[in-house]
Image (cartoon, rainbow, N blue to C red):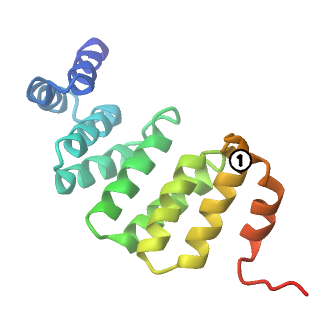
Amino acid sequence: MIEDLKIAIGHRSTGDFGKAESLFKELLNDHPEDPSVYYHYAWLCDNMEREIEAIPLYEKAIALKLDDEELPDCYLGLGSTLRSVGQYKEAKIIFQEGMKLFPEREDLKLFNAMNAYNLGEYQNSTQSLLEIIGQFVQEPQIAKYRKSILKYAKDLNRLYD
């Protein structure tokens, strides 16, 4: 089973979506309780711009207790997919669950910030994005302002005397 899953993932990675989908369908039929198969098939559906089909596959992977190695990416995939189809409130719940389980995952925070923008939570969105920029951008013209960026990120509306 593991070898077939690797082959299906390889086809997905190279853009051979037809072969990948055939293998994923076989794997789901043969291993209906394997969360990794659901997760990787959901990812394929996203790649094929079939987001609505991906959502229940991601949800099933989480429900079946996907391992901690793939689980953060599954939360990201599900949240991002929900956001991309306009299900912003649902995406927020998923991103918050993922960030609670995996607080070290900055990618979840980044995608949550995009979703916050879609919800009209502009201050939260901008604050999160500035914190990520302040922490991770190494470009010298930005990095030299790291301390200021992180300070302003906490309260963009604060005025100084």
Above or below, 25 relative to 152: above
Image point (22%, 28%), residue name = 31
Viewed as shown, does residue 24 lie left or right of 80? left
> 73 or 136, which is in the foreground?
136
Residue at x 23%, y 40% (from the top left corner)? 47
**Observer-nearest of 151 and 107:** 151
Q: Position of residue 136 (x, y in %)?
A: 67, 44
Question: Given the image, on which type of amino acid does mark 1 rest?
Answer: Gln
* Vertical relation: 59 (above or below) 125: above
Describe residue 18's horizontal placement relative to residue 102 as left or right.
Answer: left
Q: Nearer the viewer, residue 146 or 129?
A: 146
Q: Which residue is mark 1?
A: 141
Q: Residue furthest right?
A: 161
At 14% across and 30% down in the image, what residue appears? 17
Q: Residue at x 24, y 16 (%)?
A: 7
Q: Is 102 placed left or right of 145 in the picture?
A: left
Q: Secondary structure at mark 1?
A: helix
Compared with 160, 143 (above or below) is above
Measuring from the top left, give residue 135's x and y in whole percent.
Answer: 72, 49
Q: Residues within 10 Å of mark 1 (few under 14, many from 20)?
A: few
Q: Quadrant of the C terminus?
A: bottom right
- Residue placed furthest toward the front: 141
29, 51: nearer the viewer: 51
> Could you tell me which quadrant the N terminus lies in?
top left
**Number of marks in the image?**
1
Q: Residue furthest top?
A: 3
Residue 42 percent location from the top left of the image:
26, 42
Q: Position of residue 22 (x, y in %)?
A: 9, 27
